[in-house]
Amino acid sequence: MQRIQRDDQTAFQQLYESFFYQLYQFAYSYVQSKEIAEEVVHDVFLRLWQQRETLETIENISVYLYVSVRNAACNSLRKKKTGLLIPIDELPQQQLQLSINPESVLINRELQARIREAVAQLPTRCKLVFKLIKEDGLSYKEVAAILDISVKTVDTQLYLALKKLSFALHSVWQDYTAKPTPPSKSSAGSSLPKKKLFQP
């Protein structure tokens, strides 16, 4: 941050690239528009650069950026629609876009799709808390500050999210493992297929 305060554009570009995708997804969860979400994030970073001399007053840059994006997104909705802030629980389900990192889960595409479906069925607040903690790597305290809720509420929402996912994915995994394993080419013509180890 000190480098940015000294007008280091390279350091600022690194900060931008580190946070852009997560902040874009977060903004999109509110505005449900790719163009507006990008504009919101760009505007937040533009203001940050314009006010770079005051960066030393920011205690947590992650929380600052997420809160700034949340406020900018809500302002955009207020101008465009009702003139009122929209509570998290009233956001439409489809507005929250979550991604499963294929490099972190060694399962096939079909099961990944089923996981996405299970995540999509989570209540809006559960889903958003799950994303910020499990995907964006934020702490409970940071998420509480970003969403303007208590740490206890964050803990409760994450517990509910994990409980619902555990239940949903347990049945998915049972369905998946119950599928018959096709015989290998080498066993074609044999009376019985060779026994194979299950590899998820």
Image: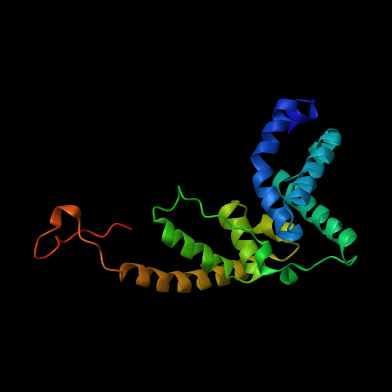
Q: Is residue 152 visible?
A: no
Residue 99 horizontal/vertical position (percent): 56, 55
Relative placement, left or right, of 102 versus 79 is left
Residue 19 horizontal/vertical position (percent): 67, 43
Q: At x 81% / y 35%, what residue is drawn?
A: 49
Relative placement, left or right, of 62 versus 84 is left
Q: At x 57% / y 71%, what residue is drawn?
A: 121
Colour approach in the figure:
rainbow
Q: At x 74% / y 55%, what residue is drawn?
A: 33
In the rendered view of the protein, which quadrant contains the N terminus? top right
Q: At x 26% / y 60%, what residue is drawn?
A: 198
Residue 179 horizontal/vertical position (percent): 30, 69
Tell me the quarter of the picture where residue 170 sits: bottom left
The image shows residue 69, relative to residue 117, as above or below, that is above
Between residue 126 and residue 108, name the one nearer to us: 108
Tell me the quarter of the picture where residue 42 sits: top right
Relative placement, left or right, of 53 versus 166 is right
In the rendered view of the protein, which quadrant contains the C terminus? bottom left
